[in-house]
Image (spheres, rainbow, N blue to C red):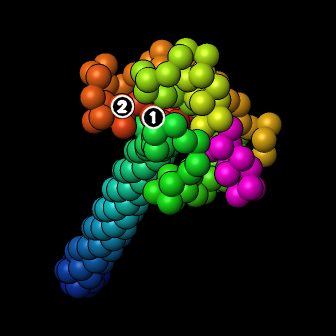
Amino acid sequence: MKRRMWLMVALLMLLPMALMMSACAKSGVTSATQADQAALDAERTRQEELARQRALEEERLQQEQLLSQQAMDAERSRFMNENIYFEFDKSRLLPEAQEILRNKADWMRANPNVTAIIEGHTDERGTTEYNLALGERRAESAKSFLVDLGISPSRLTTISYGEERPIDPRSNEEAWAKNRRAQFVIE
């Protein structure tokens, strides 16, 4: 009987200890699970931030490419649409025309694969033969200036349309001034 009583006392003493150990063990598991979850959450947050930064970088690069392409298109358009003009019955380059040609030479140096056609035009006064010859002298004058600025002659061809392609079909000084020109076409 005494032995049984000691056994009961021992069990009563061991029971709280067992409960405490069990609680501690669960607490450790819980802590470990919470730590793992926190690490997973932190990693997920980090991955989401990296993805957001990559998306922002891609968007920035696309925006830069778009702006770059627009700038290139604008320069190309400017090269083709900016004519040079001549005095009546002359093929001499005016200072304004020389400045425009310097800009065209800069653009051609920046775009070494571009080749261009220089079209010479005249107003309607004079014979067809005379105007074709004058248009050719105007186109050649522009070409020579560009070649002197370092543009290879192989990248430039000339053609004269004389009076055949007027910008302004009217017969007055304003229209004639617009038609006495050299135009540039990118091949």
Q: Is residue 79 above or below residue 29?
A: above
Q: Main secondary structure of the magenta part?
A: helix
Instruction: Please say whether residue 146 is one of the residues in the magenta stretch.
Output: yes
Q: Which of 98/16 is in front?
A: 98
Q: Residue at x 46, y 39 (%)?
A: 88
Q: Residue at x 62, y 44 (%)?
A: 142
Q: Residue at x 48, y 28 (%)?
A: 122
Mark 2 element type: helix
Mark 1 element type: loop
Q: Is residue 166 above or below residue 84?
A: above
> Which part of the image, by quadrant, shows the N terminus?
bottom left
Q: Position of residue 29 (x, y in %)?
A: 33, 67
Q: Say left or right for 24 vs 95.
A: left
Packing grade of label 1 (10 A; few <14, some 14-19, many >=20) is many
Q: Position of residue 106 (x, y in %)?
A: 60, 57
Which residues fall within the magenta stretch? 140-150
Question: Which residue position holds label 2?
Answer: 176
The label number, if any, that marks residue 165 in the structure image: none
Q: Marks 1 and 2, how far apart in space?
A: 6 Å
The amino acid sitting under disc 1 is Arg
Instruction: Please say whether residue 129 is one of the residues in the magenta stretch.
Output: no
Question: Which residue position holds label 1?
Answer: 180
Q: How many labels sit on residues?
A: 2
Q: Position of residue 23 (x, y in %)?
A: 24, 73
Q: Is residue 56 visible to us here?
A: yes
Q: Which of 15/72 is in front?
A: 72
The amino acid sitting under disc 2 is Trp
Furthest residue toward front:
126
Q: Position of residue 46 (x, y in %)?
A: 37, 64
Q: Residue at x 51, y 28 (%)?
A: 121
Q: Say left or right for 122 vs 133.
A: left
